[in-house]
Amino acid sequence: MLPRVAFVLASIFALAQAPAPVARDREIGKQPAYTSEPLYGLFVLNEAKNIRSWAVFDKSSKGSPYYDVLYFDCDSDGDLTEAGERFAGNFHPDQEWVCIQVGYEVKVRDTESRYKRFKFYAVPTKKGPTFWFTARWNDKVNIHGGYGDVGVAGTSFGTSPESAPVFHVEPGENLSYGLYTTETRYELEIGKEARIAMVVGRPGEGVRSLTALDEHFLDLRLEHLDGVLIGKNSSGVEIRVPFPIDHHC
């Protein structure tokens, strides 16, 4: 048997420069009367970072075990009390989630950009609700998030606007990477290849705030992406192994 090297996945990617923080003013112009403790997320819809929409989860009844109501600021004016900005979903026991769609499309104010089939998912867990979202940008690129450095999609919203994660969702040049896996440790055999799946997308602000972009955004025949696997061998010596990211899953 070939010798093995145990790698602890501390980081396997070269992170892009983090995005400049959005304005520190986290006030919301108008909020509805919530039924339960609201949970907040902030979505930056354009590259200029000046068009932002709040997404706030609520419950349809105080005793509900599910976050099945979403307020989304579709016109980015800071008013969540307007007609057409409250959306509701139902719990799907076969999938164990609540799915809520924000209308047919969200048009980004003062631009040609739009997000179709903007969907939010809420999953009740013992540690609290987990959320993720999907959408299609300008009929070209599917986006989905939020991701962290390691893991699958699923993030937490903040208990206040100040603690809300910020998601930069418009596809652009500033990219970051995440390891797509349910594992936190690999054993790699020396001399053999190992398959490592990654997501590439827009870095956000806060824990698990990466927005992944689909395989149509980057043409790996033209774009050059590299990663670095950082770990320790069986003697405890740090090892860094560069590798190309040369094909889509």
Image: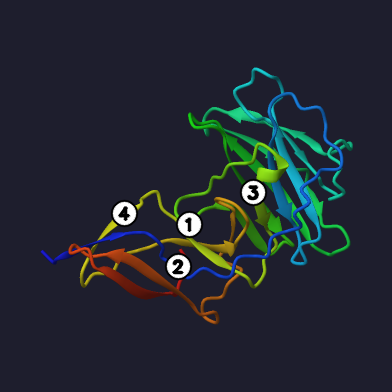
Q: Earlier in the sequence, mark 1 or mark 3?
A: 1
Q: How is the image coloured?
A: rainbow
CA separation in Å, label 2 and label 3: 22 Å
Compared with residue 63, is residue 22 higher up or lower down, i.e. above or below? Answer: below
Compared with residue 183, is residue 1 higher up or lower down, i.e. above or below? Answer: below
Q: In what element is the residue under mark 4?
A: strand
Q: Residue furthest bottom?
A: 222
Q: Would you say the residues marked 1 and 2 are in contact, meaning their CB atoms lie under 8 Å apart?
A: yes
Residue 61 location, quadrant = top right
Q: Earlier in the sequence, mark 2 or mark 3?
A: 2
Q: Residue furthest top?
A: 63
CA separation in Å, label 3 and label 4: 27 Å
Which residue does the numbered mark 4 point to in the structure image?
Answer: 185
Of tags 2 and 3, which is closer to the observer?
3
- The quarter of the rendered structure image containing the C terminus is bottom left
Label 1 Cα neighbours within 10 Å, binned few <14 / some 14-19 / many ≥20: many
Q: Would you say the residues marked 2 and 3 are in contact, meaning their CB atoms lie under 8 Å apart?
A: no
Residue 114 location, quadrant = bottom right
Which residue does the numbered mark 2 point to in the structure image?
Answer: 13
Which residue does the numbered mark 3 point to in the structure image?
Answer: 165
Q: Earlier in the sequence, mark 4 or mark 1?
A: 1
Of tags 3 and 4, which is closer to the observer?
3
CA separation in Å, label 1 and label 3: 15 Å
Q: In what element is the residue under mark 2?
A: loop
Residue 105 in picture, x, y percent from top left? 78, 50
CA separation in Å, label 2 and label 4: 15 Å
Label 2 Cα neighbours within 10 Å, binned few <14 / some 14-19 / many ≥20: many
CA separation in Å, label 4 and label 1: 13 Å
Q: Which mark is residue 149?
A: 1
The residue under label 3 is which amino acid type? Pro
The residue under label 2 is which amino acid type? Phe
